Every structure is written in C-alpha cells, then in structure tokens.
Image (tube, grey):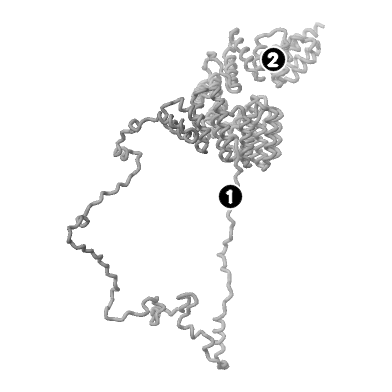
Amino acid sequence: MASGGGSVASLWTEVNRCGQNGDFTRALKALTKILHENRDDVTALHCKIVCLIQNSSFKEALNVMNTHSKVLSSEVVFEKAYCEYRLNRVESALKTIEGAPEQTDKLKELYGQVLYRLERYNECKSVYTDLIRNSQDEYEEERKTNLAAVVASMSQWEKTLVEDLGLPESTYELCYNAACTLIGQGQLTEALNKLQQAEELCRVSLADDSDVTEEDIESELAVIHSQMAYVMQLQGRTDEALQLYNQVIKLKPSDVGLLAVTANNIITINKDQNVFDSKKKVKLTNAEGVEYKLAKMQLQAIDLNKALLAMYTNQADQCRKLSSSLQSQNPGHPRPVLIQVAQLCREKQHGKAVELLQQFSDQHPESASGIKLTMAQLYLVQSHVTKACDVLRSIEEFKHKSGMVSALVTMYAHEEDIDSAIDVFKQAIEHFQSEQPGSAAHLALVREAANFKLKYGRKKEAISDLEQLWKQNTNDVHTLAQLISAYSLVDTDKAKSLSKHLPSADTMAFNVDVDELENSHGATSIRKKAAKVIKPESLPKEPGQGDIKKKRKKKKGKLPKNYDPKATPDPERWLPMRERSYYRGKKKGKKKEQIGKGTQGATAGASAELDASKTATSPPTSPRPGSASGSSTATASNMVPPRQQKPAASGATRKKAPSKKKKGGKGGW
C-alpha cells in the first residue's frame, strides 16, 4: 500500500506540474492512472473533466460527467453547462444552470451568454447589469462589452430604444457596439463616424503588440469594415460598399458568421444582375456552424435571398422548396408566400398566385395588408379593375388613407363607375368627420369630393360638400361661386340669396400695372400691332379732284445671253439636247450606245438597223474560205459568259462574329 500511495502522490505531483505548464494531455495520462487506482476519486474526476474541456473535448467531458453523475452530483454543474453550451445544446445548458443549487458568479456569466444566444435580450441585460454592479475584478471591461452587445441587439432586432446606460467607449469593441446601436436607431451618419473611430482604436491597440502582424490587424478589422460597408449600402453608396465587402471576402476571415453576412449583402447588391457571382457567394452562407453564429432574423434574411436567387436563376423547384421551408418555419410571415407568388407569376400562373394569396390572407388576417395589396396588383395585371378595387376596400388598415382613396377613385373613374367613386369619398369623409373633424386632411378630402362631383355633372350631390367648405371659410370666393352654380340648377332662390355674399365689382378690381406684368420674368412675349399710319393719299379728297389709279410695273422676263431678236426660235428648244434631231453626241472619246436614254420604251436613231423586218430576206451566203475564225469569234462575242464566283483571298477564312452572352432576366426585391 505504501508503494501504491507513493505512486499516487507522484502522479498528483505530475498532474499539478502539467496543469501549471498547460500540458493538459500529459496531465490526462496521469489522471487516468490515478482513476485506475480509485475509480470514484471525485477530485481526479473533476480534474479530468477540466483537462478535457481545456483540450476542447467537450463530448468526452460530458460523457465522464454523465457516467459518474451520482459521485459528482453538484460539483461540476458549471462544467456540464459549459460543455452543453459549447456543443450548441443551449436549451440543455439553460436547464442545467437554472437547476443549480447555488448561482455563483461564473454560473451567472454563463447564464448571460446562454440568454444572449437564445435572444432573450431583456433577461440578459438584467443579468449583466447585476454582474457589473456587484463585482469588481479584471473582467469588468468584458462584462461592459457584453452589455453593449445586448443593447445593440435590442436596437437592431427588436427595434427597442434602450436608455443610455453610461457605457464607456474606451475600446474598439465598445465603440463598435455603440455604432451598431446607432444603426438600429437609423442614425447612419453617426454610426459611420463611430465605426471609423473604432477602426482607429483597433489599430492603436494592436500596434503596441509586437507579435501582431499587419495581416492580423486587417483580420481583426474585417468585422468593422463589413459593418461600414453595410451602412454605406443603406445610404445608397453601393459601389463603395461592394468594394469593402470584396476586401473582407479576400481576407478569408475565420469567422464563418462574418463571411456569411458579407456574402449575403453582396448578393443583395447584385439582385437579378451578376447571378453567377451571387451563386459563388451563396456557398459561403452554407458553411458549417453558421446557424450558431447568427441571429434568427439574419438566418431568415439569408434563406429568403437564397430563394430569390433560385427564382432569378430559373430554378423553380429549388425556389419552391426553399420558400416552403421558410413558410413552415414562420407560418405567419408573408415573404415566403410572396416569393412563391412571384415564381408562379414568372410561370404565367396568375390564377394560382391569387388563390395562394387569398388562402394566406384568410389564415393570417394580421399579416394580410401586404398580401391584399399584391392581390390587387395581380388583378390589375389581368385587367380585373373592379376586383382589384374590392380587394383594396377590404383592407381596413389603409381604407381611409389619402393614397388609397385616390387610387380607388382613379380606378372607378377609369371604369366609369362614378357612384362607387363617390361612395369611397363619402366613407372617407365620414371617417375623418368622426376622428379628425376640421383637420387639413378632412377638408382636403371634402374639396376633392366636391371637385370630382362637379367634374362629372353631379352638382346636386356636391352642394353639401361645398356648403361645408364655405362655412369653414366664408371669404373663399371660388367655393362660393361653385356653390351658387350648383344651386342654380336646384334652387334658384337659394342661389340668388347666396349671390348677395359675392364681393362688389369695386372690391374685386385689382390695381395691376399691365406694362409691368407684361415685362415680368414669367410673362410670355406679346406681339403688339403697329399703329396704322395715315397716308396723305388716303385722306378724303376735295370735290372735283379725279381719282388716279396707280398701275403696277411689270417686271421684264429674263432672256438668254445669246438672244437674237431677229432670229427664229428653235422649235426643238424644249426637248433635251440628246433628243434633238441635230444632236450628234459627244465627239471626245469612243461612241457609246444610246441605251437607256429618254423615256421608257424609246429607242435611239439606230433602232431601224436593229429591226429584223427591215433587213434583206435573202438567205445568207456560205462563208468564204478563210473566214471561219472570224465567224466563230463573232458568235462567241454574243454569248453570255458563264458567271464565276470571285475567289477569296489566299489564307482568308470567313469567321462568325462571337455572340453576346445573354444577361440574366430582370426581377424585384
């Protein structure tokens, strides 16, 4: 026993020395020998679990704890919860922590991490606030960084405005989280300035470490640059954003979550263009472990973009599969359904698309507003204007909005359904009469309703609207004139009584300087007629004076240069020179046959020689000896020679011009 005890003591010495040196693999060998001597040694089991955790052997550590659960009991609650957390069994880790007999500080730290992973940000914020308030050690800055991350997540994903907790911005992590909070609040310019400040702090803090290379600094800055690109993208500076995104991708950072978000944002910039680049980038979003690095909203956005990319690349089955999967995960979310509808519309199946939208709106009325707007758009595409109006009027949320009233009235007027258009105005006016009487929106609706009724000859129906407007402003002469005009067809006495309220002609006269108005910048040019000048000739003549009429002088016609008045004019002077009888053609050069000259069908003077009927009818005599060669030459000259294709130049080949690559089809986000 003494030797055995000495052996165990030396093994413990070995374990202690290896633990101090960080050689946990060698310590495990010593602990295995100790446990061989005493299988249920609690201290040895605890040390073995710690060594396995240090070597990232979380499954083995968990197996040891489960195997010796009776012996270890509550000794290793933190280690068990930590292993479950690292194995992404977050729900199990939460149960382990909540079931612990005592909540130690390290358990609270882990509890905050678990709540953050589960996106229970309010509870997580309370945990970190309590830890910061009740602890003073070297980890205070890390706790503040985690609390700043919780506040940023609440601002971005829950759109919650959190009060200022007075967190410092002394490190680049704290500064980065403050920038994320500003992004969630929509303060993009301030967020970009804060990110630039975080970049400077990061460079300064890492430059002091001699072991850190420039590549390490750029790798650490990748997350800041990616967030800066996101802000630029939101500001519409897509070219600058794309350049920064590509720089991050080229660095190939080890954070798969960062790579996935950056690649997804590049895909959103590409949209329906550059789909081949998008197909390459989408592979980065499928990396192992991405689902544990990102929030649920980020994962949903990535999956939606995958479905849209499948639609743009004409992968209909893949698009339907992805959108159906998204719909099963989020039954009340309208976007997966809208993607399926878009795919059906690309396949010209508008009827099925409308049925799918109607089914979703019936099942999820709380999300039906956007769905019904899409239904109305599809009905308009199919020229079913009345059906589109019925769908729009069923949306209670937008029913009395000015834009909706305007759209409905325009569509009903297009269909010449004036009664329905007036009914839309009536319902909207009644709504504002009860909710916001006398407001600017209310009076604007009444004004538009009156103008619409007057435009379509409904003066009797416009009277009540015009009276309401006039009572609001009795000095409105234009409305009063419209009201009198409307009453003139219904009640002339009322029209006469109202006419008394019209201002007098003197009060309506305006002191306007006409010359100044005509010379103003906006006035158009007016051509003034010159005053008539009275000539002496037009004055009344004295009696006895005769009327002398002036005769117009006739202009002499132009004569040729060589005109001889004594010579007789050439009777053929009106004919072209080549058709005159004395024309002999040009003397210079060879004589050309007069073919194609003159009017159609006309022949030259040699036509008589070519007439076969005027030639001698005697049979031709036999050729003289020695004249055969001349005869054959004449015959050959009258023959049409065979046509030959012009040979191509030596070495030349005919090439087809390269065809342009067809771009991807156009679509919407």
Where residue 370 appears, as percent x and y from the top left, is 62, 31
Asked where in the image residue 71 lies, by quadrant, the reply is top right
* Residue at x 19%, y 57% (from the top left corner): 541
Q: Which labelled disc corresponds to residue 61?
A: none
Q: Which residue is mark 1?
A: 660
Sequence-first tag of 1 and 2: 2
* Residue at x 58%, y 36% (from the top left corner): 419
Asked where in the image residue 613 lies, by quadrant, the reply is bottom right
Where residue 25 appears, as percent x and y from the top left, is 72, 19
Q: Is residue 562 left or right of residue 115?
A: left
What amino acid is at disc 2?
Answer: Cys
* Residue at x 77%, y 10% (from the top left corner): 72
* Residue at x 56%, y 16% (from the top left corner): 162
Q: Which labelled disc corresponds to residue 18?
A: 2
- Determine the secondary structure under disc 1: loop
Q: Are marks 1 and 2 in contact (CB under 8 Å)?
A: no
**How far is mark 1 from mark 2, CA to CA?**
68 Å
Q: Is residue 362 left or right of residue 594?
A: right
Residue 386 against residue 530 in the figure, above or below: above
